[in-house]
Image (spheres, rainbow, N blue to C red):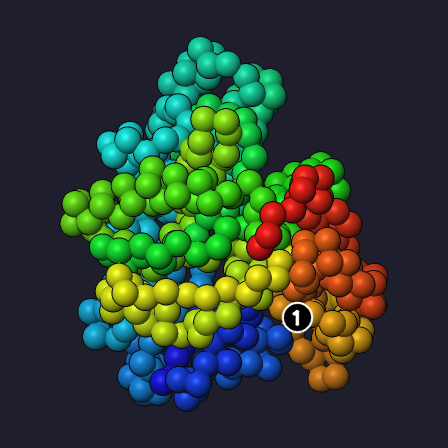
Amino acid sequence: MNVLLIGSGGREHALAWALSASPLLTRLYCAPGNAGIAEAAECVPLDAADHAAVVRFCRDQRIDLVVVGPEVPLVAGLADDLAAARIKVFGPSQAAAQLEGSKGFTKDFCTEFRIPTAAYGRFKDKRAALAYLERQPLPIVVKADGLAAGKGVTVAETRAAAAAAIDDCFAGAFGAAGAEVVVEECLIGEEASFFALVDGAHALSLIAAQDHKRVFDGEKGPNTGGMGAYSPAPVMTPDMTRRTMDEIIWPTVRGMAARGTPFRGVLYAGLMIADTGPKLIEYNVRFGDPECQVLMMRLKSDLLPALIATADGVLKTFDLRWHDDAALTVVMVANGYPGEYAKRSEIRGLDAAGAVEGVEIFHAGTVQEGPRLLAAGGRVLNIAARGKTIAEAQQRAYRAVAKIDWPGGFCRSDIGWRALQRKEPKP
């Protein structure tokens, strides 16, 4: 099979790494890719926003399956245009992608189908949002409704901070994403990332993970796109996994189908786990980044047939196998991230780092310039490792990090801390 993978980050490198191992694969392309992905796929300068160009490429290269990694092309309807051209695609339609594209849509959907989530208000008017804020307990969460690259969420401890976040949204800090605002209850508990493949009618639960959003050790500093992740997530016991499927995933699958917008792709539920059970924080309509990296490290089955089964609607009789080992990934970012950061600093030592037992290095924002590897983004590298336990995976990952010579970047030193504070379950 010829496969086209859309994207250029660490998630896409992990997917390319997994797909390249499939005996079903004839040729793997990635658009646009990065320096690391180029080791597993042929990178092509294709703009995913130009849907007609993507369709032409697929026809010219006889692409059998398109795998869309990031959320932006999905929300923009790339899957619809591919399907209209009779090109098989892994990823939801534009209508189904609203589950990530509009937080207000998802909150209303949860109300309609009785999916447990935080109490909320949805506003297009700043005065109405501020008036609602005055009546709510603290802390409180303010979210830009649309896609804001993971930066449109504020957990406010004071009304002044919440009001400032509302002001920022309506003042255009997040562009069109902030034209509407969701103000919601701040859930208390432990977060987890839960994934399921969905073919429109059936769902197949995958393994869960936990990520680290804050930029500094000890969960300090601003939110980021993710500074690291690990799997398994100790909080996701078999009972909590069952409840998540029964109370959140299955009602979503049935609800989207009942609306005439069936969901096909991977459904990523950001959860808050409390004593009362799981509640949905938000949905993403693609693999998480950096959670995808640890999922691919633990996946024992061939990924490609699973994506095909999802696209073809035959998940009901499908299953996946997973390694018993744990996996952990450390994200290395450019100095200054998530604010302004310098680009094109040189990175050395990846060969030595990649030689550490159990380690794979996934590139998130790199470019090759002759013999030099240069940083080309905020999140730049993912140092992923497998081990018999989360502790062993953590040790291996940081052993590899120590071999990387990159003065222009940094990482957290405590990825996996929450799991290590409690007794680890068997993966």
Q: Residue at x 66, y 70 (%)?
A: 360
Quadrant housing the C terminus: bottom right
Image location of residue 228, percent across then percent down: 64, 52
Give the vertical position of 302 relative to 345 (above or below).
below
Q: On the image, numbered disc 1 is attached to which residue?
A: 360
Q: Residue at x 42, y 36 (%)?
A: 280
Q: Residue furthest top?
A: 135
> Label 1 is placed on what type of residue?
Glu
Q: Residue at x 50, y 47 (%)?
A: 193
Depth check, front residue: 424 or 228:
424
SS at badge 1: strand
Mark count? 1
Give the vertical position of 275 relative to 76 (above or below).
above
| 224 left or right of 285 in image | right
Image location of residue 409, percent across then percent down: 77, 58
| 308 left or right of 157 in image | left
Image location of residue 129, percent across then percent down: 41, 21
Quarter of the view holding residue 170: top left
Crowding at mark 1 (Cα within 10 Å: few <14, some 14-19, many 20+): many
Q: Residue at x 71, y 44 (%)?
A: 420
Q: Is residue 44 visible?
A: no
